[in-house]
């Protein structure tokens, strides 16, 4: 078949007729282009340009959110804008890095002005709260997918790494792990929460709070840190493996908040230990600096709890309040495992 | 319905049973984790850590590739690994930036070892050729989507920006724009190429060559630059708008290579002027430095052609070899336009 090509480009669909509205470039400009203040050059060129920052290291991370996997279809786009940035800021928090800038790549099934307006409102509200600047991005048509890349700054030697836990460290966690999973179970119909309980836990799933201030406060104080995205025990296992140590976790020392203690024990434990989507910080710090950790967390305005200790015996030992061993049969989250 | 949660995490599916193989973490480790040399800390922590580079600015860019839109379903995963990085390197080239490091976020419908093996082979072959290091990433299950973020370095004031074209500049292009679109038309059944012609143009679509060496050679020499992803006229329009200038393009001065001149004129012009997916550099440079541009391109091993000139009259004027005006009715590529 021989025919002239349409006046279109590449693999994609025909181009917008000149003068039509709501094209890609207009959409990007309308919702995402803001004056660059920190960047020398922001959204709109082939690359963003960032000034050299003397004597600071860059922390960079990328996280992709897929509909049906990281958020339910029909999620409020304002919450989604918040969450997409929050989970990325959480990675900076877990390194003790100061947020600097981010890039956003977005695949959308359609260019929906109302959706983009709400999404960008949620995104920029959190960005402004953390003084992080959007410097670049990409928009394309496709199944809904949000891919963010964040850049942060940390002084040399101050990053909170996964491989820095030491035998003798205390094991700490921020916030209330498990509430996000409890909310998800309700949305999925696995169980039913009352309206008060749901109101308490739903924001933990939909609009998690990245613990940036805590990460910064723990610089020079904590040894290792990780953010809880895949469930406490699974994420702890990453730290233990990377650091070549073991740990004992006191399951009943995990903070329960108002709602989890009202739940059946099996459900409560599963949510707390293997729930995922918490975006709290799990970290280790020397026992001798316990009071300093508490003071740093208080200064950051983030509740922290001591939930166990790091030791030299490989593996993870889980005990209840009576000191009884609980089987640690809560495997790590895995995106590709078969049901 | 009240039931205990499975021992799984978050919105995703149940976790991998302990000891099972081919889980997410093993897959990532097997195919993507390489020893960090440039990064202080590479794949495997919450963030990568990059050393401060004194007196250099960072160029950062993100590009998302979606199946069916940026590549056809069933594309050889080795070619896809090459292309996903190539289109991102092309953004660094267009800024005159030296590639430094990149992050890869990947949504896959299934964890397919053979696919990942071929994809990573194509990706790393190009990464090694350009001395760019994978420092972080994310893997999840979902409709096939590749989102890369690249970081490069450029000395202050040396970046090739879109807004720096000046009246009186020459207008240059590298390589042979249009060959990728010609290959795509064959694959789509819009026309049929003979085997020799296809063999010539198909690699331009499947394995484009990012013009990194040319971008570096043009530092301090070119004024403005952009990479051709959405079609020559559309991308040129971005430069003209950002720079507040106009241009005259001599359509018959566009290099045709071996295959395009054998095609009907309408098809040839459409491919050359609005094809897209070229990943060539379009740039402007002072007329007085024409010989230097030619020498720089020769040193970089990249053919360049003079295709027009920048002037102060807003808009874009297209002429043929006889000086006749051709209507510039090849609109810019737009990902969200309706057919």
Image (cartoon, coloured by chain):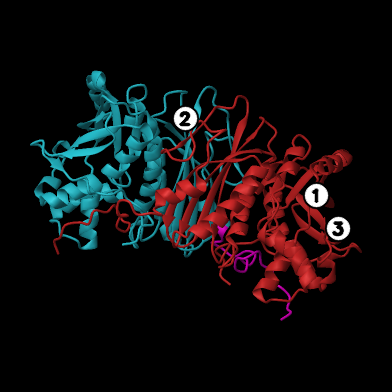
Chain colours: A cyan, B red
Element type where label 3 sits in the image: helix
CA distance separating discs 1 and 3: 10 Å
Above-or-below relation of A337 to A41: below
Which segment is the magenta one? A1-24
Residue wearing tag 2: A153
- Parent chain of label 2: A
**Tag 2–tag 1 contact (CB < 8 Å):** no
Residue B26 x, y percent position in the rendering: 42, 49
Residue furthest right as drawn: B322
> In this rendering, which labeled residue sits more in front, label 2 or label 1?
2
Number of other residues with Cα within 10 Å of mark 1, as a class: few under 14, some 14 to 19, many 20 or more: many
- Parent chain of label 1: B
Residue A53 x, y percent position in the rendering: 54, 26
Above-or-below relation of B159 to A74: above
Using the image, tell me which numbered label, if any, was put on residue B172: 1
Number of other residues with Cα within 10 Å of mark 2, as a class: few under 14, some 14 to 19, many 20 or more: many
Above-or-below relation of A130 to A198: above
Residue wearing tag 3: B253
Element type where label 2 sits in the image: strand
- Can you see residue A46? no
Left or right, A306 with reference to A165 = left
- The tag earlier along the polypeptide, 1 or 3, is 1
CA distance separating discs 2 and 1: 39 Å
- Quadrant of the rendered image containing residue B338: bottom right
Residue furthest top as drawn: A288
Residue A285 x, y percent position in the rendering: 29, 25
């Amino acid at each position: 078949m021989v025919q002239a090509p349409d006046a279109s480009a590449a693999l994609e669909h025909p181009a917008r007729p000149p003068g039509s509205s709501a094209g890609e470039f207009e959409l990007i400009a309308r919702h995402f282009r803001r004056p660059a203040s920190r960047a020398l050059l922001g959204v709109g060129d082939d690359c963003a340009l960032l000034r050299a920052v003397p004597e600071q290291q860059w922390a960079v991370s990328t996280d992709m959110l897929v509909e049906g996997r990281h958020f339910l279809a029909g999620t409020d786009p304002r919450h989604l804008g918040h969450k997409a940035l929050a989970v990325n800021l959480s990675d900076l928090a877990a390194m003790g890095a100061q947020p600097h800038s981010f890039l956003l790549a977005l695949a959308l099934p359609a260019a929906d002005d109302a959706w983009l307006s709400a999404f960008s409102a949620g995104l920029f509200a959190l960005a402004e709260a953390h003084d992080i600047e959007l410097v670049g991005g990409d928009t394309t048509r496709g199944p809904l997918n949000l891919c963010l890349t964040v850049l942060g700054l940390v002084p040399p030697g101050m990053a909170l790494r996964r491989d820095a836990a030491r035998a003798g460290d205390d094991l700490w966690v921020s916030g209330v792990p498990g509430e996000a999973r409890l909310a998800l179970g309700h949305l999925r119909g696995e169980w039913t929460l009352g309206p008060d309980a749901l109101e308490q836990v739903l924001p933990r799933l939909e609009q998690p709070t990245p613990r940036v201030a805590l990460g910064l406060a723990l610089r020079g104080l904590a040894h290792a840190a990780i953010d809880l995205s895949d469930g406490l025990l699974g994420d702890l296992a990453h730290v233990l493996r990377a650091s070549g140590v073991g740990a004992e976790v006191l399951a009943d020392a995990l903070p329960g908040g108002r709602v989890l203690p009202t739940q059946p024990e099996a459900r409560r434990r599963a949510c707390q230990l293997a729930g995922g989507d918490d975006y709290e910080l799990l970290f280790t710090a020397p026992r001798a600096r316990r009071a300093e950790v508490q003071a740093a967390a208080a200064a950051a305005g983030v509740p922290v709890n001591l939930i166990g200790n790091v030791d030299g015996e490989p593996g993870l030992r889980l005990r209840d309040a009576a000191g009884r061993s609980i089987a640690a049969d809560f495997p790590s989250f895995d995106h590709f495992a078969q049901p």
